[in-house]
Image (tube, rainbow, N blue to C red):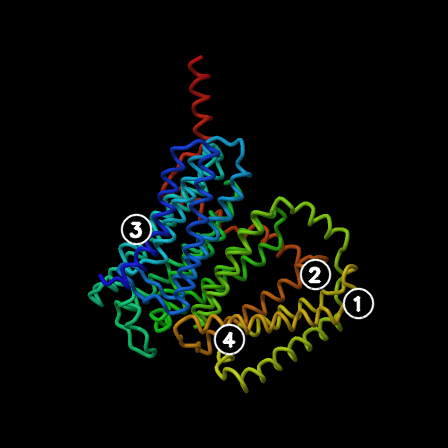
Amino acid sequence: MHWNELLPTILLSLVPAILVLGALASGRQTSARAWRTARTATLAGLCLSALLLALGLAQRLPAVIGVWQATPLQLIMLLLANFIAFVVVRYSATYLQGEPRQQRFVTLVQTVFAAVSVAVLSDFLPMFLAAWLGISLAMHQLLMFYPDRPRAALAAHKKFLFARAAELCALGAFLLLYLHHDSARISVIVGAYAAPGGNLSVGEQAAACLLALAALIKCAQLPLHGWLIQVVEAPTPVSAALHGGVINLGGYLLLLFSPLLLQSTPARALILIVAGLGSVLAALVMMTRISIKVRLAWSTSAQMGLMLVEIALGLVELALLHLLAHSCYKAYAFLSSGEAVQEDLLRRQAPGRRPTPAQWLAAGATSVALVAGLAVVVRAGFDSSAFAVVSPWVLLTLALTALLAERRGPLASGDGAGFLGLAALVMLAYFGLKSLFAVLLPPAEHTAPLWADLWMSTLFVMLFAGYGLQRHGLHLRWVQTLNLYCYAGFYLDEWVTRSTLRLWPHPLPARIKAKRLHATTGEA
């Protein structure tokens, strides 16, 4: 290997190696030293990831180096994973003070993110799948940090089975792609689909559908979402690591293989139907929940569905931006969930006022004018294809409408100009960041079938209508009935849980203790 490739290979290999060494050292040390070692290891991984991304953006790294890939997609994901790892470790050192098995926790956290680093950098299908399996098994142990909690055990059991199903789907897809391309290199396989408009064989179509199914399962899409809601029984840093980092790997899988996915109509349809419906339903359910961690979990399911939809629509740069923003926000939201009571008290002191129909119409007209004005400017001077997919702009228009219509609370009364400026800033930030990430990623086909655009636009309108009814229509009896079904999650998880336990029973801790107590009492 030439020196120009040897040094980058060593630097890339050091990131997971540092975390692995930190995990091994932490498991043999006292609690205080274990946390210091973990902070040092994650900080070193973060700094090295930032250096690698800077080198990659400066085009000082080859796209493929030995067993690793070093394109901007991989390096951005590597930096994100190590940033979340550092934040979680720093927070956990205080959060878990006095808890038993702290060394086990800090060892597992570093193991999880070492495996994530391998997965996002790997250029070989077997290595990627092995790292994905390692992430899942280590995360399973973190979810069982409190093994005596029945709900935690049930959630971990369901997650364990669904994760194995997703990995089997990925394994099937990888085998089909290997047989078709006679190569296990991801860069070679993905490069074969760089030119759009190719005709896929039956095996390639099946592989694309299996990859889509694996991502849907990994991203906890309805109806296989219940475990994500119930794992809030685990410590808060575990939730931050899961929602801020690990669950995004389903989206990364589709981003990685997006050139193949965008040429497969059945795979795109599968994602648009399942993830599209799931994201709308999960968002409506989220608004009925009171527990902050449960609300955040439902929000994650909705956001993951929306991110998968963006990939299926061909908006891969928007999906990557969404992934990064969601990871950082959700990690912060879980780690700051202890402030939820204070925030709720502030909201109660300043309740919002119900907008009048005239205010809704004025807000809608303003939003349409803002988006239309941006469309004219963008198409004329920047990118004529920016509005080839209309449904995201429909969603943005509806979101701006709600923002402008509901601005008239006691704390924001009479501040219409400020909210209008905020709406314009949101639009400019959306387009600017989307354009920035489009430069970092390989060009993708930014077209979607007409039916897909109409389907998602309809779902977004339904979401907007459901939001308005839940916020301002609960005085109606039929809305109250609908709200009850939303609160119950449409009873989907109950059906899945019964089916799962029927197919693969699992003894829960409370049942085990009850049987032991009964046996002891009987003997006495």
Look at mark 4 in the image and give the residue it sits on.
454
User: Alpha-carbon distance for marks 4 and 2?
Assistant: 27 Å
Say which amino acid is labelled 3: Ala
Amino acid carrying label 2: it is Gly
Give the camera-side residue of 294 and 191. 191
Kindly identify which residue carries mark 1.
414
Q: Earlier in the sequence, mark 4 or mark 2?
A: 4
Cα distance in 3D space between marks 4 and 1: 37 Å
Tag 4 and tag 1, C-beta contact below 8 Å: no
Q: Residue at x 58, y 58 (%)?
A: 284
Task: Kindly identify which numbered label has been placed on residue 271.
Answer: none
Q: Quadrant of the C terminus?
A: top left
Residue 104 higher or lower than 488, as above or below: above
* 351 displayed left or right of 322: right
What residue did someone put label 3 on? 130
Percent coordinates x, y for residue 208 in the rendering: 33, 66
Residue shown at the point (66%, 59%) measured from the top left: 470
Mark nearest the camera among 4 and 3 is 3
Q: How much space separates mark 4 and mark 3, taking CA atoms?
A: 39 Å
Q: Secondary structure at mark 1?
A: loop
Which residue position is annotated with label 2? Answer: 473
